[in-house]
Amino acid sequence: MSDIAIKVENLGKSYRLGTVGTRSMARDIMGLFSGTQKEKANENTIWALKDVDFSIKKGDAVGIVGKNGAGKSTLLKLLSRTTAPSTGSIKVSGKISSLLEVGTGFHPELTGRENIFLNGAIMGMSNRDIRAKFDEIVEFSGVARFIDTPVKRYSSGMYVRLAFAVAAHLETEIMIIDEVLAVGDVDFQKKCLGKMKEVTGSEGRTVLFVSHNMSAVKALCNYGLFLEKGTLRSTGPVQAVTEAYTAANKGLIETSDLADRTDRSGNKSVILVDYYAEDMAGNRIETVLTGEDIAFCFTLRCGPEKARNVDFGLNFYDPEEANMGVLYSSYQAVYFEMEPHQLMRIKCVVPNFPFTIGTYKVGTRIVVNNEESDWLLGGAGFISVENGDFYGTGSTGFTHPYMTNFLGRWIHEVQK
Amino acid sequence: MEVPGINFLAIPLKEKENWSLEIRPKANLFDLKFKEFWQYRDLITLFVRRELVPTYKQTILGPLWFILQPLLTTLIYSLIFGAIARIPIGGMPQIVFYLPGIVLWNFFNSSFLKCSSTFISNAPIFGKVYFPRLVLPVSGMLASLVNFFIQFGLFLVFFLYYYLFSDYQLHPNWHIALLPMLILTVAFYSLGFGMMVSAFTTRYRDLTHFLAFGTQLLMYATPIIYPMDIVPDKFKWINSINPLSPVFEGFRQSFLGIGQFQTQNLVISFGLGILIFFTGLILFNKAERTSIDTV
């Protein structure tokens, strides 16, 4: 028996553009008679995935990287059989389970216990398998006390933890995971990463992992697939593939779903369309150590008119929405200028990051010519902080969460 | 005799590829995947539970709702069709006449409606995880069946009361032995039609608007609130082309002994039901492969 877990040949998926209505019905009926299925595939179809070939060995942990719209989700959908391909084939050896979104099929009225069974069965486990794993699942999720409470009374964190716990204990040879690590608190994320390492490492299962987070991909995977515009751009050892991906994206300014948010006030002459944080080596990060240098990166988009005197402000909130500190570029006499419809990336490097352990919400506000232009009311994102070497002495200092560290110059005199 | 130079064993046997799953654009239309379906039987039990339990959670009357609903419907029918419209019901007590039809119709109607909305109401979960989609219509049908048995028990209570303690002439007869076949026929029709509708609605929503109207029409074309023998001759064809007629007439006839039930009509209806079921299943399997692209 060969050691290939998944073999994909000439895989493609097309979607028909436009709405479904009477005309599409007419076309369907015409298609039935003329039998020209292939000729129809022209003007109004787009290929979300085209001519993709690869094979994955058993026990490999494969990271799938690519920009939004590169075809990652389509590939996962095809592999997890939620939709059928338009061309080509996928051959699989072993049982596949997909973890495209945790908590799929949870019913709010049912208790945690009932939902574990339901969710497990949806993922293809038998009642006997679930019973055998039940205690382990509850233990991992940490919601033992509430196991007989309907899940609609759960906090969102508990909900996600329980759902991940079920998914992580599936006994399948091949697991597909799509960005699930973006949920839960820092501790639970670590637990998830640990569990995933265990799954790929000691248990020897095959894992496909989709993420935008290159450091997570590098930490978890040994092999990579880089998709671009629906085709496979490169495959190989994870280091090479993530490097290719990073190189391909250099100098490219991306917008994210921040642009579509509606919880904002201001005249929108310049708005925030993307936020992330970087370490000094240019890797995207979600966690920083106290005392490390960090760059907060913001992408701004200018409206139809030129904007002068753009003043950018950021601040940090603790979980109780208390403001921990504010910095506007104008405080340091820095202003930006933007041309109509221009995208601009602003990096704010904060040396010696002062806050102690915790997860801080990052707030932003843009002011143009002393008028509020864009204020994201729900914040632009989060930054998690772990205690680090703020003082440069190896001391973590006062490690209470949500505090600010500061340096002092110490002078002493002795009474004569 | 040995042929020099040719050694058959040296030709490597092509390693037989042994995949557990192959995904291709087109599937065999008649591959109904029963084996895979069977592997997910635990999921069916859980879905049935999921259908039934929340119906009475957070209600004061709880499981009583399972029997209150047909009782109230019977009350309304007795008032409108019995007391006001005065439709003759063969000298039967009203509750014993209306209840069996209502109970069986509830089974058909709820199973059909659950099944016909399969792709639309489950689109979020279908977009994320694969399991044989047939699990959902079947568990919807089974949940309706459980409901049916509870309500059928209610009917039996009334039936026995009138049979044992009243002067009404109820004639239960050997047709009761056909009950499993009657129930199966209803199950086949509700699943078959339901799967056809759900397959069609993945692309065109028109049918969903027609459903409430269509099921109501079908209900009046089925002998539920009236016995078949009072139908005027010029409308008799409606009952005779409606494959559900012999089922409902037979259901009532087996307990009450009234009506125009003929066994061969039921057999025809049963056969047609199986045909409808498999047609529905084929269309459903075809639709499930790409349903999430269009819903």
Image (spheres, rainbow, N blue to C red):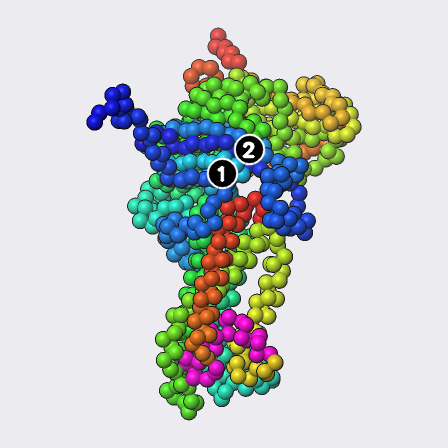
B112 and A303: which one is in front?
A: B112
- The chain carrying label 1 is A
The answer, for residue B118, to whether it is visible in the render is yes
Residue A78 image label? 1
Mark 1, other Cα within 10 Å: few <14 / some 14–19 / many ≥20: many
Residue for point 38% across, 88% down:
B165
From the viewer's perspective, is A333 left or right of A352? Answer: right
Residue A307 lies, in percent from the top left, at 76, 25
Q: What is the count of numbered marks?
A: 2
Q: Quadrant of the N terminus of chain B?
A: top left
Can marks 1 and 2 be said to lie on one chain? yes
> Magenta residues: mostly which secondary structure?
helix
Extreme-top residue of the structure: A416
Q: What residue is shown at x 46% (from left), y 47% (from top)? A: B28
Residue beneath disc 2: A49
What residue span does the magenta drawing correspond to?
Answer: B235-260
In the image, farthest residue toward the right: A305
x, y percentage for residue A176?
Answer: 44, 36
Tell me if residue A398 comes above or below residue B128 in the rendering: above
Q: Position of residue B265 (x, y in %)?
A: 46, 74
**Residue under mark 2: which chain is it in?**
A
Look at label 1 and name its amino acid.
Leu
> Which residue is nearer to you in this view: A291 or A171?
A171
Q: How many residues crowd mark 2 within 10 Å: few (<14), some (14–19), many (20+)?
A: many
Residue B250 inside the magenta-drawn segment: yes
Is residue A28 visible from the viewing direction of this image? no
Q: Secondary structure at mark 2?
A: strand
Task: Indicate yes or no whether the magenta region holds residue B3.
Answer: no
